[in-house]
Structure formats: structure tokens, C-alpha cells
Amino acid sequence: MASPPQKALPVVETFDEQQFYLDEFRGHSVLFSVPAEELVRDADFEQLAAVTRALLTNDTRVLILVGAPDGEHCEQLLRRLQRRLGPLVFRDETLPLFPQRGARTGAFMLLNSTALAEPGATTPTLTSIWDTLRRGPLFVGIVPGLSRDGTTQLAQAVATQLRVHKLVLIAPEGGVRGSDGKLLSFMDETVLTALLAEGQAEWAGLAARRATFAAVRAALRGGVQAVNLCTLEGLARELFTYEGSGTLCTLEDYCRVERLGIDDFEEVERLIERGQREGILKLRGPDEIAALLVNAYGATIGRHHLAGICALLTEPYASERAGEIAGLYTMTRFKGEGVGARLIARVLTDARQSGLAYVFACTTEERAQVFFERHGFRRVDPDDVPATKWAGYDPQRKAQVAVCRFDLSPARDQEEPAPPRLSLGSPPLLPTPATGEAQGGGRTPERRRAHHP
């Protein structure tokens, strides 16, 4: 008797961090603004070309504007880019995207530096860009006679007119640093507007970048989804990795906290497992991780960047109307920018509305204890939280753990911590704890993926 056909085993797809990020760009357009002086070494051209190839083969249109203050050698600049950048972009994996030979040389074009400022010239310029993109998903515009600020302003104008998905402003300064020297991973319109107020950029030591901030805000207000500020060397790291390398700018409030949905679970589970492998997060089994996911909150930066998570576990402690904050995890890129405080504030609000008497968190890390105490928690004895917390708990660990409790009873008259706003001048906020029961680490992936929901 013939054996029944064997059911094919499911294919286990490995996690590809770059592809994780590329999914955000698929079907969209990305515009890079690059000063010509940044393209000197062979490594400079290869770095730009490598990112361009990755995007082109990802069904993403790429627009590159290269500006140079020298307006007398525009043809020479055009030939140099065709000769040095072209062969690095047009390789076996990208050539099928440019079926016509002329589409490769035609991807490089000289633009008039005042093209978008002259009456009646805007539409022809934008039309020529689209005509180029019809023949292949790459446009490289050479703009001689422009300063770096002028190139940035032209890139903003093109990005706004064409409503590109993302604008990337490449500069040797890279991302923005506050007066404390800390790299700001994120800026929203509120921060940009504050910087553009009279004297504010100067006070923060950022006067030289005022024109850049104005261009970024104009692009966001004009419909560009996000603007990145980074170096050419850090370009791939900024776009395709957890860590990032520069500053991400979006229009929306810098942090929004919501309950996680099932479409977020796979992404967050991978992050938790990654944090556990790195020794950042407490080891948990699959059932424990699942319990976190169905009770978890996510802090989202802009539209795509998951910046932190935490869970509020209540079912084990229902008889005492208590909740436990667990798995507090702030991505490395957004540490010190109030993400942990936002998560805690939302959890406390929901806990109060649910009628809980108190919430608690356990940690073996001193910094974690300080973090919770800064946000209104007080140190208590292990017996001051539900006994079910300690069922099967390691006695040695219990002796080391710090228990922090926040009473929600009106009788204690405690106030929930107010979410902080990003400040360019104040000292960096205390990072979310890095070890213990409530912990943090790692950079966010872009959310909403086509193949990894």
C-alpha cells in the first residue's frame, strides 16, 4: 500500500536586518542630497552605490542630487559621476531594471541651480526628472553653483514638489547633537520650530545648521514622511540597522504609546529574543514571552519606529487588584529621550482606569531602581506585593531583587509621571534600565513589513 504523501515542512525564514528595514521603502521614492565634496574617495562612491543598489533591487526609486559650489566645471562633474558612480550602481543585479542602454547614461543629468525658483521652470524640471525615472528607477541630478545650504534647499523643494517618501540630507556633521554633546536620535516639528525661534539655534550651538532645520521642517510640512540627517559613511547604518547613525525627523509628536496588536507580535518577539541573546533582557520561555506580548504596550516614534515596549501583567494578581510592569525595553537609539517615561505614564493611566490599587516592578539593577523612583515608585519589601509573584521564584534572586511599587489609591495622592519633552539644552534623561526584570536595549526596526508583519 502506498504511503500517504508527506506534508511539506514550513520554510523557516531567517531574520535579515537590512531587509527588515527595506520593506518600509518598497514601492516608494527616496531622495538623497549629497554635497560634491563628500564624493572624493573610492569608498565614498561605493558607500553611496551600495545603498542605491539595495534600494533599486527593492522596488524603490532613488533620486540623488549632488551639489557643488563650483559652477564652471559642471560637465566635468557630470562625467566624473558617470565614470565613478555609474559602474558601481549598474551591476548584474540592477541592469535588468534599465533595459535600455540609454537609460543608464540618461540617469545622470545637469540641473540648473535656479530651476525651481524661476517662474515657469518648475514643471519642466520636474517633468524631466519623471521622464528619466520612466526609463529606470534612478535619477542623479548634478547641480553646480550651489552652496551646501543651497543644495539642501533645492533637495527640499524637489522632495516637497514630488512628495517623496523620505529625504536624506548627507553632511559631514551627520546627525544633530544637543548642547550636552549627545546625539539626538529624533526631532519632530515642535523641536524644529523651537530651534528656529530667534536665538535658539545659537544658544544650542547649532547656528550653522539653521538653514538645514528650516529645510527639514518645510519638507515635513510639505508631505515628506521623514527626513534623515547623517554622514555618508553612516548612511547604510542609518537606513538599515537597529543602531542608526544620525537624526530622524518626522512631523508627528515624538512618541506615541499604544497597546500592541497581533500584527506587531512577531516583530516584538524577535526583538525580545535578540535582547535575551545579548544578555540585556531577562530570559523567558515562549509562554512567558507570549504573556508579555498580549499585555504589552509599544512606544512608536513617528509612523514606523518602534522605540520601546513594556507589559502590564494583571491576571496573576487579580485578587489583590495589582499589576506588574515587566519587560520594559527601550531601544538603544532612543535611550535618554523619554521613551521609558512615556510607557510608564500610559501604563499607570490604564492601570488607574482599570481599577487597580497599585502596580509594581522588580529589578536587580540599581539604575532600574533609580529610574522607577524618579517616576514616583517607592522601594518596598517583597511581602508588599502579591505572594503569587514569588511562587517558584529563585530564592537567591529574590534576596537580590529590588521591588518598586506605585500606589494608585487616591489616599496616597500620588501623581503619574508627566512624559518629558525632548530638550536640546537639558542634561540627557536617565536611560531606561538595562538589566533586571524591567529592562531595555537595542534599536527599533521599522514597523509594518510586507513579509514580516
Image (tube, helix red, strand yellow):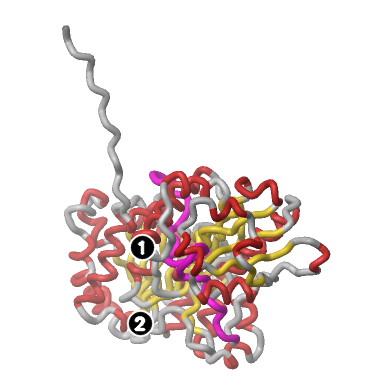
Q: Is residue 132 left or right of residue 151?
A: left
Q: Is residue 116 left or right of residue 387?
A: left
Residue 436 point in image, percent of width and height: 48, 66
Residue drawn at (20%, 72%) of the image: 84
Residue 209 point in image, percent of width and height: 50, 85
Q: Is residue 167 left or right of residue 354?
A: left
Quadrant for residue 372, please give it: bottom right
Residue wearing tag 1: 240
Which quadrant would the N terminus be assigned to in this image?
top left
Reply above or below: 220 against 322: below
Q: Is residue 300 magenta?
A: no
Q: Is residue 436 magenta?
A: yes
Residue at the far top in the pictured view: 1
Residue drawn at (62%, 66%) of the image: 342
Residue wearing tag 2: 68
Q: Name the secondary structure under disc 1.
A: helix
Mark positioned earlier in the residue sequence (2 or 1): 2
Question: Magenta span covers which residues?
Answer: 426-453
Q: Nearer the viewer, residue 310 or 149?
A: 310
Residue 275 point in image, percent of width and height: 40, 61
What separation in Å lies between label 2 and label 1 (alpha carbons)?
28 Å
Please rate how many residues cluster around mark 1, counting C-alpha atoms within 10 Å: few if below 14, some from 14 to 19, many from 20. Answer: some
Q: What's under tag 2, amino acid-wise?
A: Ala
Q: Nearer the viewer, residue 64 or 328?
A: 328
Count of numbered badges drawn on the protein: 2
Residue drawn at (55%, 82%) of the image: 428
Q: What's under tag 1, amino acid-wise?
A: Phe
Q: Is residue 329 visible?
A: no
